[in-house]
Image (spheres, grey):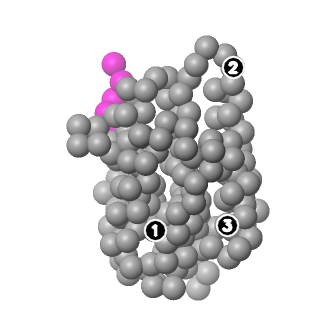
Amino acid sequence: MTSPQRIPNINITKVPSSTKVAVITALWNTDLTEKMENECLKELNKHKIKVKSFKVAGSFELIAAAKTALVKKYDAVIVLGVVLNGETPHFDYVCQAVTNGMTQLAVEFGKPIGFGVLTCNDYQQAYQRSGFKDSKENKGKETAEAVLLSLLTHKQLAK
């Protein structure tokens, strides 16, 4: 029997209004990624910061788009996508590439990257994490909270 996840309760203090965040969303599994994006934007907009949304075809394309956003001086990037396991190893390649790509960007730029890419065995698992009323989790909102907290932590570390 697995133990229940302990999702942290993140309380965000004042984020500077000049903060720029790019939210980049993959179009595959659009019903899920749009819900995640909406939940993410709802959370970010509570803090009255500068948020801009972008779309890419799939989760693999999130890597180059995130790099462009960081080069263009966004303070943080949030990537949202859903990769579902199919009958071929393509799932493994895409998941590994996106994870490694985002990790490399975080190290290279030293800026917060919110990793809201669901890598699930099936549609139902992804649905349960996408923030619908009957979902168990809300990864769009949680990713926004994590990035906001990281932004504040980075600011404190820079003092």
Q: Return the residue nearer the eye: 38 or 112.
A: 38
The answer to whether any part of residue 117 appears in the image is no
Residue appearing at x 31%, y 57% in the figure: 9
Disc on res. 89: 2
Identify the magenta region.
1-5
Measured in 3D between alpha carbons, the distance from the residue under mark 1 to the one under mark 2, in whole angstroms, is 34 Å
Q: Is residue 36 above or below residue 72?
A: above
For mark 2, give the secondary structure: loop
Classify 10 Å Cα crowding around label 2: few (below 14), some (14-19), many (20 and above): few
Residue reaching furthest to the top: 87
Disc with the residue nearer the chain's start (1 vs 3): 3
For mark 3, give the secondary structure: helix
For mark 1, give the secondary structure: helix
Which quadrant would residue 20 be assigned to in this image? bottom right
Q: Label 3: which residue?
A: 69
Measured in 3D between alpha carbons, the distance from the residue under mark 1 to the one under mark 3, in whole angstroms, is 17 Å
Task: Locate the N terminus and report the quarter of the image it occupies.
Answer: top left
Q: Magenta part mainly helix, strand or loop?
A: loop
Label 1 or label 3, whichever lies nearer to me, is 3
Disc on res. 148: 1
Residue appearing at x 56%, y 66% in the figure: 22
Classify 10 Å Cα crowding around label 3: few (below 14), some (14-19), many (20 and above): some
56 relative to 132 in the view: left or right = right
Residue appearing at x 67%, y 59% in the figure: 66
Q: The disc labelled 2 sits on which kind of residue?
A: Pro
Disc with the residue nearer the chain's start (1 vs 2): 2
Residue appearing at x 23%, y 37% in the figure: 134
Classify 10 Å Cα crowding around label 1: few (below 14), some (14-19), many (20 and above): many
Q: Position of residue 150 (x, y in %)?
A: 51, 66
